[in-house]
Image: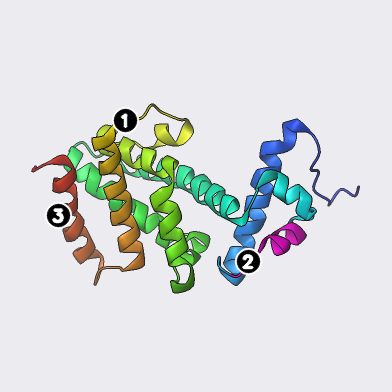
Amino acid sequence: MTSGTPTWLGDDRAAMAANRILDVAAELFLTHGVAPVNMNQIAAAAGCSRATLYRYFASRADLHLAYVEREARTLAKQVAHQVSGVVDVHERMTEAILAAVEGVRTDPVLRTWFVPESAALAGALGASSALVNRIAVAFVHDGDGSSAADHTTADPGTESNLEGRFVVRVILSLLMTPGADATEERELVRRFVTPSVLGPN
């Protein structure tokens, strides 16, 4: 095996290999868009066989979900850092939602998930991911989604789960159908979304 060939063997390399595949997939998403990229292309670009690829990700849907959840973890930590100095819980909630939206819009790869041909897929994955929902719940109740991004937390309960799903859907909605400008989006979140989750300020 040459030095430029990825090493796929060894249990201790499993996480590294899976992340390498996701990195390669991200490059393909950026070049071709999310929807057109298939498992054959990913395997070829990653330098592994289809059989190896399917050992890590049983289907393209599984790979998509793994990618979305990996990026959600990273984004949650970035947002938590951005809002860490905001004391008022209502302001922090508003800023967290807007920071999450901006974080996706300014990331070249994540942005490709919200072009028209891929937006429905992105919305379905974001709305159905238990991890994404846990992160949203953590922001609602703790003001910090980074802890939920690092490990599985206990089920917060029906009401909290609904709050998390609502916040996720708001973020997805803004990504799919942006407001007229940043000022309008801020007012929508500040006046209608944050109070509906946290109550009046």
Sequence order check, earlier mark of 2 and 1: 2
* Amino acid type shown at disc 1: Pro
Q: Which residues are magenta?
A: 36-45
The residue under label 3 is 192
Q: Nearer the viewer, residue 56 or 1?
A: 56
Q: Residue at x 77, y 61 (%)?
A: 44
Q: Residue at x 24, y 44 (%)?
A: 93
Residue 94 lies in magenta, yes or no? no
Whole-percent x, y for residue 21 in the image? 68, 51
Sequence order check, earlier mark of 1 and 3: 1
Residue 180 figure quarter: bottom left
53 horizontally vs 163: left or right: right
Q: Nearer the viewer, mark 1 or mark 3?
A: 1
The residue under label 2 is 37
Determine whether the residue tagged by mark 2 lies in a helix, strand or loop: loop
The residue under label 1 is 156
Whole-percent x, y for residue 186 in the image? 21, 58
Question: Is residue 177 shown above or below 70?
Answer: below
Determine whether the residue tagged by mark 1 lies in a helix, strand or loop: loop
